[in-house]
Image (spheres, grey):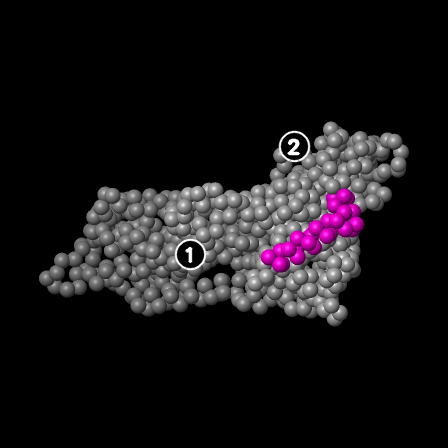
Amino acid sequence: MAVSTDESEPLLVTAKSNGSSKNSYKSVSDDGSVSIQMDSRLIQKGLNNGGSDGVKYYGTGGGGGGGGGGGYPGGEGLPPGIQAPEKITYTWRDINVHAEDKIGCSGYIKRFFCPKKARYNAPPKHILKGVTGIAKPGELLALMGASGAGKTTLLNALTCKTSSKMELTGHRSINGVPVDENTLTSLSAYVQQEDLFIGTLTVKEHLIFQALVRMDRRIPYINRMQRVEEVMAELTLARCQNTIIGVPGKMKGISGGEMKRLSFASEVLTNPPLMFCDEPTSGLDSFMAQNVVTVLKSLASKGKTVIVTIHQPSSEVYAMFDKICLMAEGKLAFLGTPAQANEFFKVLGAPCPANHNPADYFIQLLAVVPTREEACRNMITMVCESYKSSSHGAKMLHQAEKNTEIQSTGLPSPWFSKRRVSPYKASWWAQFKALIWRSWLSVIKEPNLVKIKMLQTFMVAMLIGILYFGQVIDQDGVMNINGALFVCLSNMTFQNMFAVVHVFCGELPVFLREHLNGMYRTDVYFLTKTMAEVPIFIAVPMIFTTVIYYMVGLNAPFSRFLCALIVMILVSNVAASFGYFISCISSNMSVALSVGPPIVIPFLLFGGFFLNAGSVPAYLTWLSDLSWFKYGNEALLINQWEGVENITCSRANTTCPADGHIILETFNFDENHWYIDLMALTMLMVGFRFLAFLGLLSRAYLKH
C-alpha cells in the first residue's frame, strides 16, 4: 500500500459503500491523485461504523505520529495513511478470564508451608464466563454489578490491561476489525479511577504539558494551544484554568469534580473516538457525580463510544445512561437500555418497585447474599439464561458474532501494521523540553521547597558560624576547624539527601501511569527531573559556604574560598544523587526515610574524622572508597592546611602539630590528592545517579 502525499499537509481519506459491486477506499492528495486502493469486501466488512454511510479519517500523511486533537485524531501505532475512525463500534464476544486460585498459599512463608499439590495443581478461578457485548458510537454504556460481579475485570479485559497472572480468551473488534493491544491503545482513552496529577501545576499548565507530549508531533504549537482552550471550554474548566491542582489533604486546589473533569480533559485532548472510565464518580457527592456523568453524556453525544464502570449510581445518574450492562458472578445478566431492563425484569416476575432506584434494585437482585448463596446463584443463572434466550439478547449475541468474525479477505487489517513504531507520540527532544518545563515549574512553585530551604540553610550556617566563630591557628583552633569542616560536610549531606528522597517515590504513581501511557521515556523523565533541581543544589552550598567560611576563620585567600565552595557543591550533589537512588528503590516515602540514614552512617564513619583512613580494615576498604565523606573531608582539609607553616601551641609542655603538613599526615591524607578527590566526588555523583536511573527503570519494567 503506497501513500504519496506531502506530510506537511493533512490528508482526507474517505470510505463509502454505494451498493455497487465494486467499492474503493481512496486517499486524495492536493493534486487530486488517488494513492490508496482497497478491496470492497474489506470496506463493507471491516470499515462500517454502525450503519453510517461512510467513515471519515483525518490523517497526517505518514507514520510515527500519535494521537491528535481538534481535527487530528490519533494515528500512533497505525500504518501510514490509515487513521482513527471518527466513530467506533466496539464488540467483544465470549470473553473468558481465568486466574490462578492460590487462596491460603500466597506469600513466601505461606508457600513454604503450603502443600506442593495445592500450590501448583489448584484449578484456575473462572472470573469472566463467556461475556459478550456491543458498545456503539454516541452511547454511554455503564458496566454495573455488585462487588465481585466482574465489572472491573471486564473493563480491564476490554482495555487490554488484564494482569499477566490472568489468562484471557475471546474476541474483540472495532468496526468489525480484530484489534490488538497497540491498536486499541492508539484508538482509545482510559480514565482511571484514581486522579493523579502534579499538584503544583495549574489546570492550564497541566493541559499544556499533556498537549505537548500526547498530540501528534507534526501538529503546530499554536494548534495545540487552541485545542487546550477548546477542551477547557468544553469541560467547563476555563474558570479554574489558573488555579493550582493541589493535593487532597496537603495542598488546597481545585475541587474533586473539577479534578475528575481534568482527568477527562487530559484524555479528550487527542479526540479519541473510544473512551473507558473506571468508577468516574468514586468519592464524589451526588451533585458532583451527576456533573461528571453529564460530561460523559456530552462526550458521547458528540459521537464517541463511552464505556464506564459505576457502583450504585443515583436514580438521576442511572437515567442518563444510554445502555447498561449488568454483571453477576462473572456472567452477563443484561445489556440494553434502562427501559428495556425494566421490561426484562418485569417479564421475569421481578419488576422494579415504584419509587425505587432501579440501579440499586438490579444490583441487589443480582448480588450473592452470604446466607443465601445457593438460591442467589440459581437466581443469577436463571436471569442470565433468560436474557440469552430473549429476543433482545439473541439479537445482540447474533450481532456481536457477526461483528467479530475474522476477515477472510486475505488482506491485512487496515489498523494493523507489522512495522515496529515508537509508542511515544512526541520526539525525544520534544519530551525533554516539555518535561524540563514541567519539572522546573514544579520546583519553583513548591511552597516549602525554595524559600524554606534557603532560610534553613542560612540559619544552620549562622548557628555553626556563631559556634565556631573566629578560630585562630593554634592547638585548640586546629581541632575546632577540623570539626567545623566535618560538620559542614555532614550538614550538606543530610540536608540535601533528605530534600530529594521524596522526589521519585512521591511522583512514582504519576510517572508510571504517564510512562505506560506512552507519554515519555524513562531516561527523559529522570534526566529532566534531576536537571531541574541542579540550581538548588548549587545555591544551597553557595549560601552555606559564604555565610560560614569567614565567620569560622578558615583559610583567608579568596582562591581557597572558591576551592572550598567547589568541594561543598560537589558533596551536595553527591548526597542528592544518593538520595535519588534511595528514592528510586523505595516503594514510598516512609520506606525511603527509614532506609536512608542507616545506609549513610557507614559512609560517614569512613570519612576520616571518626576512623583514621590508614586504620581501615582491608576487607572494608571498598566501603571507604565509596564514602564521599572521605573525599570531601580530605579535599577540605587540604584546602585549609596546605601551605600553613606555623601553628602556635596554646599550652605549655604539650605536643602540637608544627604545620599543616603534619595535620594532614595525622589523618593519613595526601596533600597531592585534591584533584583526585574532586574526580572521585564527580564519579560518585554520576555513579549514584546511574544506579538511581536503573532503579527507576526497573520499577517501570516491572509495572509492564
Q: Is residue 184 visible?
A: no
Q: Residue furthest left?
A: 653
As measured in the structure, the alpha-carbon distance from the residue carrying label 2 to the one carrying label 1 is 43 Å
Circles 2 and 1: CB distance less than 8 Å?
no
Looking at the rendering, the stretch of residues picked out in magenta corresponds to 374-400
* Relative side of 224 to 685, left or right: right
Q: Which residue is mark 2?
A: 418
Mark 2 or mark 1: whose residue is earlier in sequence: 2
Q: Observer-nearest residue: 697 or 340?
A: 340
- Quadrant where the N terminus lies? top right
The image quarter in which residue 590 lies: bottom left
Q: Is residue 344 left or right of residue 125?
A: right
In the picture of the structure, the residue carrying the numbered disc 1 is 592
Decide whether residue 197 is among the magenta residues.
no
**Mark 2 element type:** loop
Query: How crowded is the residue under tag 2: few (<14 C-alpha within 10 Å), some, or many (20+)?
Result: few
Residue at the image position 38 percent from the left and 52 percent from the top: 571
- In the image, 423 versus 241, the foreground residue is 423
Q: Amino acid at mark 1?
A: Ala
Q: Crowdedness of circle 1 by 10 Å Cα count: few (<14), some, many (20+)? A: many
Q: Residue 315 appears at what percent x and percent y?
A: 72, 66
User: Quick check: 128 above or below 24?
Assistant: below
At numbered mark 1, what does the secondary structure look like: helix, strand or loop?
Answer: helix
Horizontal and vertical percent for residue 613? 24, 48
The amino acid sitting under disc 2 is Lys
Question: Residue 390: image x %, image y %?
Answer: 77, 51
Quadrant in the picture for the C terminus: top right
Q: Main secondary structure of the magenta part?
A: helix
User: Is residue 389 in the magenta section?
Assistant: yes
Question: Going 34% across and 53% down the picture, which residue do you hit?
Answer: 599
Can you tell which mark lies on residue 648? none
